Structures are given as C-alpha cells and as structure tokens.
Image (cartoon, rainbow, N blue to C red):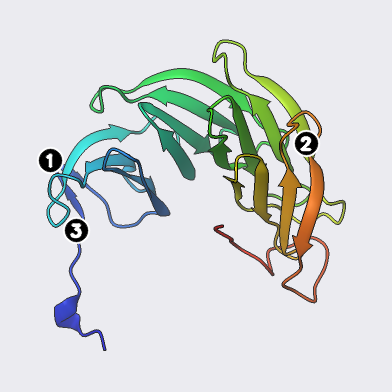
C-alpha cells in the first residue's frame, strides 16, 4: 500500500519550474528530458542526485511533444510546427538546432532511430496519419524514404525500433502493427495484434505499446 508519506515530488530547480508535462526520456548518460511541460523541454541531471536533480538546460523554441536522445543529439517532435528537429545538446545550457524536417501530415508526434543512427522513423498522430522513414545520415540533406498507413484512417501514436529492423507501432483502433524496416524505402507490414473491436478513425484502442 502506498501512502502519502511514500510520495515525493520535484518541480524544478535553478529558476526553472513547471506544473505539468507530457512525458520523460532518460538518455544513456543519465540526463532526463522532461517534455511537453509548461516550461518547455527541461534537461535534468538525474545521474548525480536523482532525489534532488539539477536543471542543466531548457529548450523553448517550439512546443515539443516527444523526444529521442542518443549521445549529444536531441531529436524533438515539434507537434504544432509539424516537424522533427535534430538539436546539438553537447552544451546542455546552450542548445543548437542542426536540422529540421517536416512530416507528411504535419502532426509530428514521435521519432525513433535505428541502432546505427542513420535511419529515423516518425509518426504523425492524426487521422490518416503516417509512420514515415527518413535517411538522417546527413543532417544537411535529410531524405524522406517511405510512408505507411493501414488504410482505415486510424492514426498512429508511437513507433519504436526493436531488433535492429522492426518498427513496432501503436495504431489506435488497428491495435499493434509491426513493420519490417530493414528496407526503409519500402516498409512492409509483417505483423498485427488487434486490441479493439472498433475500426476506423478516432482515438480509441491501442494508445501505446513499448516493446
């Protein structure tokens, strides 16, 4: 049983405070990225002191709905701007935007990279939205490679890359859809697990999956 005495909270540091947020991404270096907050994207050092972490950076150029971080690159999904961005966070207190790329439906919700970091898969969370693939090996010339949608109008929510090549997606009323991303210029559905008796557009059914 959890009681009030077991619960603690943290709402900022170094003059940066927030009251709500969408989610958190923690990278391999022990930095947490608090995303979709009313103070922008907040970068927090949780490795040094997780009970009382320090805010080390803040990105406020656009509203960010979700992120993926690897090394010193922050990939932001800037939902209302309709694009994802690659941001250099080598200096956490002075971020630098290296590239932006629009997504087909302009509702950029999430992004995930392959293990080698050369291919990205993004989702547009809107009716008839796509999961799309991109060659991001050259940030000065990002190329869209392919788009997938099931044809029913169901919006995608999140796309995750597993086992190197498989892109696992939550697709609301279509359930879970697995794409073979080994040839990102020609994504093919290789599996599906339907979680809902419903079909078509709208935001019921499989909201999220994490493989």
Where is 197 relative to 190, above or below? Answer: below
In front of the other: label 2 or label 1?
2
Residue at the spot of label 2? 147
**Can residue 38 be seen at all in this image of the molecule?**
yes
In whole angstroms, how far apart are the C-alphas of marks 2 and 1? 42 Å
Tell me the quarter of the picture where residue 20 sits: bottom left
Q: Position of residue 190 (x, y in %)?
A: 80, 51
- Quarter of the image where the C terminus is located: bottom right
- Which residue ends up furthest to the bottom in the rendered image? 1
Instruction: Give me the disc on residue 14.
Output: 1
Helix, strand or loop for disc 1: loop
Helix, strand or loop for disc 2: strand
Residue plotted at (70% across, 49% down) = 126
Mark 3 Cα within 10 Å, few/some/many (few <14, many 20+)? few
Where is 92 relative to 79, above or below? Answer: above
Residue plotted at (19% across, 82% down) = 4
Where is 207 relative to 184, above or below? Answer: below
Residue at the spot of label 3? 10
Q: Are marks 3 and 2 in contact (CB under 8 Å)?
A: no
Q: Position of residue 67 (x, y in %)?
A: 46, 41
Helix, strand or loop for disc 3: loop
Q: Position of residue 59 (x, y in %)?
A: 34, 32
Q: In the figure, is residue 206 to the left or right of 192?
A: left
In whole angstroms, how far apart are the C-alphas of marks 3 and 2? 40 Å
- Quarter of the image where the N terminus is located: bottom left
Tell me the quarter of the picture where residue 95 sits: top left
Residue plotted at (25% across, 84% down) = 2
- Which residue ends up furthest to the front in the rendered image? 163
Between disc 2 and disc 1, whose residue precedes?
A: 1
């Amino acid at each position: 049983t959890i009681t009030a005495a077991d619960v603690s909270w943290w709402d900022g540091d170094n003059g940066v405070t927030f009251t709500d947020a969408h989610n958190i991404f923690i990278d391999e270096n022990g930095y947490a990225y608090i995303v979709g907050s009313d103070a922008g994207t907040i970068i927090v050092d949780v490795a040094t002191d997780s009970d009382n972490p320090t805010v080390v950076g803040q990105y406020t150029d656009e509203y960010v709905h979700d992120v993926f971080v690897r090394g010193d690159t922050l990939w932001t999904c800037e939902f209302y701007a309709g694009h994802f961005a690659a941001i250099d966070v080598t200096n956490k207190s002075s971020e630098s935007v290296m590239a932006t790329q629009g997504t087909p439906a302009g509702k950029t919700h999430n992004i995930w990279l392959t293990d080698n970091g050369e291919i990205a898969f993004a989702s547009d969370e809107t009716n008839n939205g796509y999961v799309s693939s991109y060659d991001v090996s050259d940030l000065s010339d990002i190329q869209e490679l392919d788009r997938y949608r099931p044809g029913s109008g169901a919006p995608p929510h999140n796309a995750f890359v597993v086992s190197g090549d498989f892109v696992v997606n939550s697709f609301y009323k279509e359930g879970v859809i697995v794409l073979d991303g080994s040839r990102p210029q020609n994504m093919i559905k290789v599996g599906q697990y339907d979680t809902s008796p419903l079909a078509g557009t709208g935001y019921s059914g499989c909201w999220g999956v994490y493989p």
